[in-house]
Amino acid sequence: MTAADAMSNWDRFVFTFFNADIAMKYGWEILQGAGVTILAGLAVVITGIGAGFGLAALRAIGWKPVNFLIIVFVDIFRSLPPLAIILVLFFGFPNIGIVLPSLIVLWMSLGAVLAAFAEEIFWAGITSVPKGQWLAARSTGLTFAQTLRYVILPQAVRLGIPPLTNRAISITKNLALGSAIGVNEILGRANSALSMSANATPLTMGALLYVLVFIPLVIASRTLERNYRWGEH
Amino acid sequence: MEQFTQEFFNLDVMAKVAPFLLQGLLQTLLLCSFLIPIGLVSGILVMLLTTSPYRLLRWPAIAAVDFFRAFPPLVLLVFVYAGLPFIGLRVPALVAVAVAFLINSASYYGEIYRAGMVSVPKGQREAARSTGLSATQTLLYVTLPQAIRNVLPDLLSNTVELVKLTTLASVISVPELLHSANLARSLTYNSSPLILAAIIYLLLLLPVVRLIARLEHRL
């Protein structure tokens, strides 16, 4: 291969994946997708972790039929692939008269999955608090609810933060699945720009935007893990 | 209620599409049969790099792991499948799935092994080395087995995630289980195939998820 050939290959690579003209043309469009991704991500994280926390607190009451239902919900949503849930909600529900916008379907599906994982993580935290703490708190005159609120849950939350961060990141990355049902998030917009421009630059931009959104969270999770490290001898 | 059963639990439709879904299941199992073992082994290699005493190896490896943990697997898959043909590298869908998901899962498995290695006390390695075991022997017989035992629930749960990840292959039309089910749904105008696929995923993964929950609460 001559130097000229190598140069033209390199040019072709840059033209295909890092094309400035295409980037200028579709940049704003894809950036708006990042707005959708970030807002949907916040909605998923807040509702998912909130619901998971609520379910774990409810499970601590120890009412058998309720606990059974919680365990069934958690196990099912931990086992099902998120895309399968999304497809059922998006394609199945309209046939029984429930039409949900694609963004709502995406939010509900990923929110439910995160809620299941978060419940399990908080519950592991709650059960890891020694029984003596319950007894001690109750014997000082705190009610059940107060014990849960001021003694048990703060410890459970602290224990749960590192695994919860990792889980929240890996579930919110599934927002890209929204492109399969027509949500206008980063990947969806990048994909349509790709087919309109016949150039891969929009895909590069989409990928970089996703990394830009998530890399601070990944680095934060590394720091959290170091600070809350388990099994230190 | 009648309408609900007709739409989601239509036994006639389920019986009709079952053989078709079974083919999809075989494809899913085929994907898993190479993604899981290769992922588990390449994760160890990634861990060796990210825990290397040499900064020149360690830092780029950590940066790459973080990069790919921030990279949504579907975006990676579409990038490999739809992006590379533009520079003349047309890869078959199955290869694109293998490449994208191995990069993704090697990063995740690598991080889990690393957490496991960190949890093994330093003295173990020092003691093993001082009895005359080589670095490789120490890794294989002393530190790695303990590391794996410590993070077994995490390794299992990442494996469940990897099986669930194979559903994304349906987006680029690999005929795995979810893709077959979705195709059957559009042909029958009925969602029971999707529910049947969901039931198959539950049968495959629920026992493992239960096992993980038990292992976690034992720890």
Image (cartoon, coloured by chain):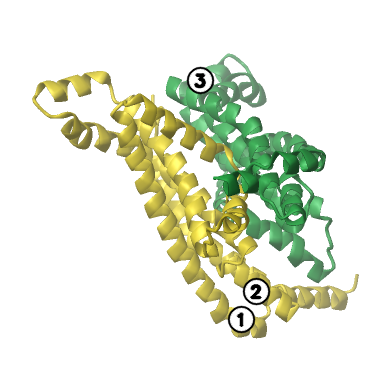
Chain colours: A yellow, B green
Are the two marked residues, 2 and 1, in contact with CB atoms closer than 8 angstroms? yes
Real-space Cα distance between discs 2 and 1? 7 Å
- Seen in the image, is B124 located left or right of residue B104? left
* Residue annotated with mark 1: A26
Q: Residue at x 46, y 26 (%)?
A: B216
Q: CA distance from mark 2 to mark 3?
A: 50 Å
Marks 3 and 1 on same chain: no
Residue B177 lies left or right of residue A92; in this view the side is right
| Residue at the left extreme, as displayed | A141
Would residue B189 be seen by someone viewing this image from the given angle? yes
> What residue type is disc 2 on?
Pro
Q: Please give the residue where the numbered disc 2 appears in the rendered image.
A: A202
Can you identify the residue that label 3 sits on?
A: B124
Q: Please name whichever residue, A31 or A18, is drawn nearer the observer in this view of the structure.
A: A31
Q: Classify mark 1: helix, strand or loop.
A: helix
Label 3 chain ID: B
The picture places residue A27, in percent across and down from the top left corner, at 57, 79
As rendered, which of B150 and B21 lies closer to the eye?
B21
Q: Say what secondary structure mark 2 lies in.
A: helix
Camera-side mark, 2 or 3: 2
Q: Is residue B141 left or right of residue A154?
A: right
Q: Is residue B198 left or right of residue A223?
A: right
Front of the two marks 3 and 1: 1
C-alpha span from label 3 to label 1:
56 Å
User: Which chain does the numbered disc 1 sit on?
Assistant: A
Nearest the eye: A128 or A61: A61
Instruction: Give the quarter of the figure containing the C terminus of chain A.
Output: top left
Mark 1: few, some, or many residues within 10 Å (few <14, many ≥20)?
some
Q: Quadrant of the N terminus of chain A?
A: bottom right
